[in-house]
Image (cartoon, coloured by chain):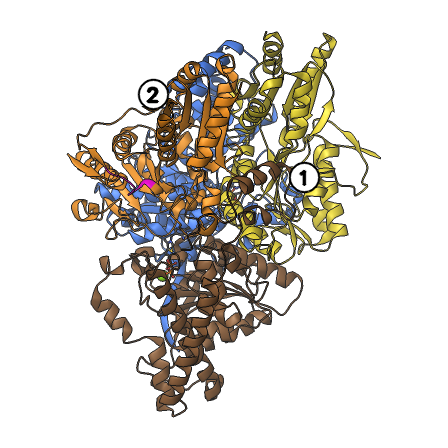
Chain colours: A brown, B blue, C orange, D yellow
Amino acid sequence: MTIAAQFQVEYQQFLDPLGRVVRPLPAFAEHPAALIALYEAMVLMRTYDAKAIALQRTGQLGTFASLLGNEAVEAAVGTAMAKEDVLLCTYRENGVQLMRGVTVRELFLYWGGDERGSDFSGPRHDFPTCVTIASQCLHAAGVGYAIKLRRQPRVAVCMFGDGATSKGDFYEGVNAAGIWRLPVVFVLTNNQWAISVPRRGQTAAQTLAQKAIAAGFDGVQIDGNDVIAVHHAVREALARARSGGGPTLIEALTYRLGDHTTADDASRYRPAEEVADAWKKEPVLRLRNYLLEARVWSKEQEEGLLRRCNEHVQAEAQAYLDTPAPPARQMFDYLYATLPGAYAARRAAILGVTSEHGPDHAG
Amino acid sequence: MTIAAQFQVEYQQFLDPLGRVVRPLPAFAEHPAALIALYEAMVLMRTYDAKAIALQRTGQLGTFASLLGNEAVEAAVGTAMAKEDVLLCTYRENGVQLMRGVTVRELFLYWGGDERGSDFSGPRHDFPTCVTIASQCLHAAGVGYAIKLRRQPRVAVCMFGDGATSKGDFYEGVNAAGIWRLPVVFVLTNNQWAISVPRRGQTAAQTLAQKAIAAGFDGVQIDGNDVIAVHHAVREALARARSGGGPTLIEALTYRLGDHTTADDASRYRPAEEVADAWKKEPVLRLRNYLLEARVWSKEQEEGLLRRCNEHVQAEAQAYLDTPAPPARQMFDYLYATLPGAYAARRAAILGVTSEHGPDHAG
Amino acid sequence: MAQITLVEAVNLALARSLASDPEVVVLGQDVGRDGGVFRATLGLLEKFGSERVIDMPLAENLIVGMSIGMAVEGLKPVCEIQFAGFAYTTIDQLLNHAGRMRHRTQGRLACPMVMRMPCGAGIHAPEHHSESPDAMFAHIPGIRVIYPSSPKRAYGLLLAAIRDPDPVVFLEPTRLYRLFKEEVADSGEALALDTCFTLREGNDLTLVTWGAMVHESLQAADELAEQGIAIEVIDVATLKPVDFDTILASVARTGRCVVVTEAPHHCSIASEIAATLAEQGLLTLLAPVQRVTAPDVVVPFPRLEHHYLPDKRQILAAVRKTLEFA
Amino acid sequence: MAQITLVEAVNLALARSLASDPEVVVLGQDVGRDGGVFRATLGLLEKFGSERVIDMPLAENLIVGMSIGMAVEGLKPVCEIQFAGFAYTTIDQLLNHAGRMRHRTQGRLACPMVMRMPCGAGIHAPEHHSESPDAMFAHIPGIRVIYPSSPKRAYGLLLAAIRDPDPVVFLEPTRLYRLFKEEVADSGEALALDTCFTLREGNDLTLVTWGAMVHESLQAADELAEQGIAIEVIDVATLKPVDFDTILASVARTGRCVVVTEAPHHCSIASEIAATLAEQGLLTLLAPVQRVTAPDVVVPFPRLEHHYLPDKRQILAAVRKTLEFA
Ligand SMILES: Cc1ncc(C[n+]2csc(CCOP(=O)(O)OP(=O)(O)O)c2C)c(N)n1
Ligand SMILES: Cc1ncc(C[n+]2csc(CCOP(=O)(O)OP(=O)(O)O)c2C)c(N)n1
Ligand SMILES: [Mg+2]
Ligand SMILES: [Mg+2]
């Protein structure tokens, strides 16, 4: 018996749950401004999230998937990516989208059931939200291939959850990225749950990061509630990808603090203590503790930030609510570049029968 | 940075390419009879294979996929499995099927374009040949689940090639087997080619065995031209599965000595030297060398064996050629347990229009 | 006898099948503790244990592929796909394996499994949650496709599907899951597959439909009845194979037919029915068969859903046009 | 001008597209050194390099999913699926992503890709190598489905498909790959999409068909011509969207129509055409529209193929029946 191959998966953390430094910080984290920017982004995400849930509860938004608990991952990815990079993400990564320039109003339009939310002002080349779990892993490989073929210094960042790792699309995508050493960073937010199925129900693998071994490249596991660890890992992976070093799989360990969506009731399937425990490790408080401790953040700054976030989100929500319903012809307008003649009659019939001011049910 | 997980993939070989023992043999191989039985099986496979190609070349069989080079893997699996175990295999594992009781005539019927070849006399519960690559990995997980649920001491053996490991079905199947520790042995014959795509074109993983790490169980790599190594690995994996120890992935390294199928011309895409090199490591000669060297096999025995194999295959080929074409109604007969009334008219029309003795093109 | 909703009727049939047949297993995403996202499997885990009520990893292709393996080995898997829009990845396994296992082994093996899923639009759901792939399934040889439209039929047809020796795709109209209740006796009596249900008799025109559109069609028929027009309403129920005898007999009597589906128009089951009527019933038709369908566009987001989905208004318009045809 | 086969015409259009548009890439299983199992991509690797002519790992879903990513990023992927029977795993990506990328982003992004594959039976191939999933593809909103039936149309339509700004499924009749040659000028001129081709004019009956069945239909028309019966033969060519104007105009003239497809009967494109004719052309029809199709059974193994596949005899029978209808 000889050994044909050996592997290991590394784990990275800088801040412990109380915001105390457990190992020397990476260079970028030496600058308070960088960490404050991350913190501000995380607080904006929380404000956005709370407003979305409030809108849904009052019948002004459709089903919504809260990002509560995801803030560190999203702020880190949003900061680390360059504008010309390409984001491929799920319904739970609105925070990254916000940081890339998608507006709160556009996100509300999306969740309000209006396709125009995906015609967003964020980087125009970013992909729309992917709902069919793991599909975007294949698209990311295609984007990576296109980038590599054109010798561009860009990276595709593909985000997905622990549940997504069970699907063939995930595996086929990472395997392809490995073959051609594509510039793709796979960011896996392991929030321990896929609706009601716990992480251990998805796979017997002891880490999800090790799934990259099947694709022939490195997977790394990080504390996903530690924004410094996430930022550090994503930054390194982006740099490697950009310089031809190929793909990375980053497993960020977090916890889904909220229900799966507003249509879900997580208390049906998970114990209250588990959730309470998770709140002790949550990312926003952790970074705030660190910043306060480091004396680079104050109560006044906090209050100012909260006010600004609230005002912004409030104004955007109003703009969303003021947006008139899309016209019926929108169904046909963007079906093809030019609508084939065969559609003319049906289009006319629908536009004739249904008044452009028919019943509207946003949400 | 800490280490979250560590893994290794082992490699096993007992006989070197010249048939010399490189490490102490496992207990079963101490009995010449066991090795002779394996040898006889391998020679029958080769005889069958040559006849199939001859039939195809003379227009008496359809496209055929040669198993040349696969003999050690197939003989080992065929011997190690119990009758009540379940085989799920591809077009290239006719050798295992033969050992399990499928007749040569039935295999020729299959390749001759007659579904009755899959209504075979081998274990009636074995799956028919799977042509859509990797699909059977999902079925194997389902079979394993059924076996486990019923607390039966049985194992599903799922065979496939290197190309199959790129498909989501493979990954989803092994991942599922890991979750419930199902009694499934995955036997991956890495013959280095998937039609014209070489092994390295499928994945950047340095071994294929390591793909099991993504599913949370062990993968092992073996010399697939060494029937003792294969038999040993399969036997161990079967025993583990049977006793509740869960699945194993065995990567058997072989070489596809022939064309992909009779419709292929491998000289278009692979160098003659590579094939010549591979012939130096081939499994049948290797075991014969060992047996001759150990003085448990003689020239006379060899001649007798070849004669018996030829006679058997010849007789079966004749029986195949003498089998009349199936009747047209066969299309409808086994579509449903009971043909729904809605099919009656169409069935009648087809049976009316096309004579039961219409043109027949076996192959 | 209890008044129950359609989704409760599904639950009842599942519970009864699990209780009466030890080979039945239920599998799918969130079917365990959560009871399924629509609660169709509520309480089953608690009653029958996690070995027989199986929370699956997030892979529809796996759910169907494993069901095939189980079925061939003699279990009776009833798997759930969370929404029809996530079922497209399973077509390969359904078509290339489930639907041909019996045929390719000439009867040696079979694949008795049921694949259930909520289907259709009308609940203002997010993208991919309002799909109607019934025609795609119906195009697959060797399987049955069932689509009940009331609690009673859901109960009886699901029992039948589970007892059937061949693979069945069982579509459940999401929109009707909780729209109304009906008395359903847990009698264990299955309804017949491969037959239409004539829900309302009438001599003026035949409305042929299935799924949630049955509801819209019945409402249209009610409204027309008030105007003295007698509409026959047929719930096709089994979409593969279709019971054309019942439909042809009805149209032979009424001479007029409108087929209603919420699936996209092109190559839909409505096309099949209209074509067959035109082929075999041409002499009895007093007017062309009209189809009321969804347009061949992507199912829009909720704010445009009411423009997309056929409704009573469109059915009434088609009926009137057909009745007025000279 | 060279006499070339259909598969050579495909090769010519691919080579020309790679040469004239640097964004075009070709990907698929064995498309490189091997030149594809049918040699449709022969010589392309040598001419355009392995970065643009990409041998893919064995995963159809990946091939299509990567093509989508490439297309959205601005490349023009032309991917090959080895046989249509292996394309079912790609329906999810086609339907849930390729076909709706433009719509879901309201025109911000697009997905200009071509998915090519050999399609249909008649070459005595093994199981899964004789499938005709054209109706399934045609049911998908937001894509085009093209099916040429001669070297010239293969060349011109493939160029058009590659230049089209939306996703196109391009089906190639395996049986016609090498059956006959035709003069094809490598002019770079694309044919129009979304239009039928009237291959033969006649006033007695319209034969509507596509793919390899065009060949059988033309032979039937030849035979009938000898008997003085003038058949109009229409190659539908674009199966989604269908150019109904041409078909309706022809049938308005001939009054009789037979639709021929080798796909399974239930919910086929033939059903769609027959239904539309009955709906919109009822007044001009002198006889019911007959469909000549494959039965709704699993494509049998080669020894039964001739019983399964529609052929000239069946077409002639349907034509005669339609002509004799009083
Ligand atoms: C292919 C597919 N199947 C099922 C669903 C329904 N669904 C939506 S989210 C979800 C769970 C996803 O879990 P995970 O990947 O861990 O992401 P998370 O929601 O935790 O962020 C499921 C099953 C879907 N969207 N797509
Ligand atoms: C899903 C699918 N795609 C494509 C094919 C066509 N095909 C038949 S065999 C083969 C290569 C298989 O390679 P491998 O898995 O290594 O097995 P081997 O033939 O070498 O035994 C391909 C691509 C197929 N049968 N199924
Ligand atoms: Mg999760
Ligand atoms: Mg191989």
Judge by depth and name the residue closer to the eye, B23 or A134: A134
The span shown in magenta is C176-181
User: Does the magenta stretch mainly form a helix, a strand or a loop?
Assistant: loop
Q: Is residue B131 visible?
A: no
The residue wearing badge 1 is D39
Q: Is residue B138 above or below residue A135?
A: above
Q: Residue at x 31, y 65 (%)?
A: A258
Q: Residue at x 74, y 46 (%)?
A: D15
How far apart marks 2 and 1 lie (CA) works out to 60 Å
Q: Is residue A110 above or below residue D316?
A: below
The residue wearing badge 2 is C201
In x, y percent, where is residue B45? 46, 33
Chain for numbered disc 2: C
Judge by depth and name the residue closer to the eye, D87 or B245: D87
Disc 2 and disc 1 in contact, CB within 8 angstroms: no
In x, y percent, where is residue B76? 39, 42
For residue B292: magenta?
A: no
What type is the residue that disc 1 sits on? Answer: Arg
**In the image, which disc is placed on residue B111?**
none
Residue C273 shown left or right of residue B273 in the figure: left
Please check whether the numbered discs 2 and 1 fall on a single chain.
Answer: no
Q: Is residue D207 visible?
A: yes
Judge by depth and name the residue closer to the eye, B192 or D246: D246
Chain for numbered disc 1: D
